[in-house]
Amino acid sequence: MSTPRPPLVYGHRGARGVLPENTMDSFRWLRAQGIRGVEIDVQLCADGVPVVIHDPLMPAQLARDAQGRWLQDAGPKIIDLTLAELQRYDVGRLNPDHPYGARYPDQRPADGALIPTLAGFLDWAQQDPSLTLNIEIKSFADRAELGAAPAHLADAVADVIAARALVNPLVISSFDWRVLSALHRIAPDIPRGYLTLEGTQEANIFAASPWMDGAARRLGDTDLPRIIADLGGKFWCPFHRDLTAARLSTAQALGLQVNVWTVNDPDDIARMIAMGVDGIITDYPQRAAAMVSGVA
């Protein structure tokens, strides 16, 4: 019986537990530590440029204006700001008075960090072809006013990728499966990863879900990976607490790679390694990489 390969560790939003999320400082640190996978978030700004940021509104927990003042509330929308307007904000430090900041007490600041473009990120990433890229497209199936239309998102991201002779291993993922359907039509050779969350108010997996693009035909215990395989997905990206041994076995037997998110607690990391997942997305990639190395 062959021994499973150890999981690939992906730094979540770069390395959110260590340096400001989705910043070039965070990405450069990740590569300097020898982490081979990086996960980022992408959406469109007002002039149609794909930019690397998670929240649909300018985040009050991260952003300072040109005068160095923290935003009092989240906003404006990313989709309403041009690239030049977005890059007037400094996103290199957590607001110490915001509850979000308390979640990452060891995060080091990188004052002066700006929101990157996807093009700039890829130009940097392709300098190291061994770096695996997970580009999550942020789309909002239940709040259309928060971002661009799924087909527009998929087209813009595919265009940036196509403009480069990119040889890095790549997966495009999304919670909004409409984006992945559009990507399949536009660029069928790009591997797609289907992000899933179940059983919470933020879930995207449920009967008649607008996030699933009409794919919720059945939802038995092991049906979800079968649905994703039927759609031509290459990756299933479940929340780690939603994964069971039976589901993992089913997914891998169908040829899916299973990348779990966002796994930070050492006990959870150890459990995912023992289960045999293919990838671990984490805010603390050094921690996960050390644990993977310890059992490899």
Image: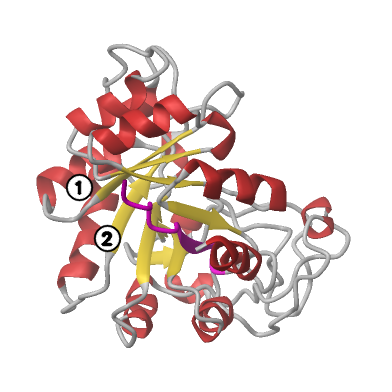
Residue at (74%, 52%) from the top-left corner? 73
Please tell me how crowded label 1 is: few (under 14), some (14-19), or many (20+) other residues with Cα within 10 Å: many
Dot 2: element: helix
Verify CB contact (< 8 Å) between mark 1 and mark 2: yes
Using the image, determine if residue 206 lies above or below residue 273: above
Would residue 289 be counted in the magenta stretch? Answer: no
Can residue 185 be seen by looking at this rendering? yes
Q: Position of residue 190 (x, y in %)?
A: 18, 56
Quarter of the rendering containing residue 108: bottom right
- In this rendering, position of residue 286 left or right of residue 141: right
Please state which of residues 278 and 294 is positioned toward the viewer in this rendering.
294
Looking at the rendered structure, which numbered label has been put on residue 225? Answer: none
Would residue 10 be counted in the magenta stretch? Answer: yes
Looking at the rendered structure, which numbered label has been put on residue 183? Answer: 1
Using the image, determine if residue 52 lies above or below residue 274: below
Q: Position of residue 140 (x, y in %)?
A: 44, 38
From this viewpoint, which residue is outermost toward the front?
A: 1
Looking at the rendered structure, the kind of residue marked 1 is Leu
Looking at the rendered structure, the kind of residue marked 2 is Val
Please state which of residues 261 and 112 is positioned toward the viewer in this rendering.
261
Dot 1: element: helix
Q: Position of residue 255 (x, y in %)?
A: 23, 40
Quarter of the rendering containing residue 120: bottom left
Q: Position of residue 72 (x, y in %)?
A: 79, 57
- In this rendering, position of residue 102 left or right of residue 74: right
Looking at the rendered structure, which numbered label has been put on residue 157? Answer: 2
Q: Which residues are magenta?
A: 1-14
From this viewpoint, which residue is outermost toward the right?
A: 97
Q: CA distance from mark 1 to mark 2?
A: 9 Å
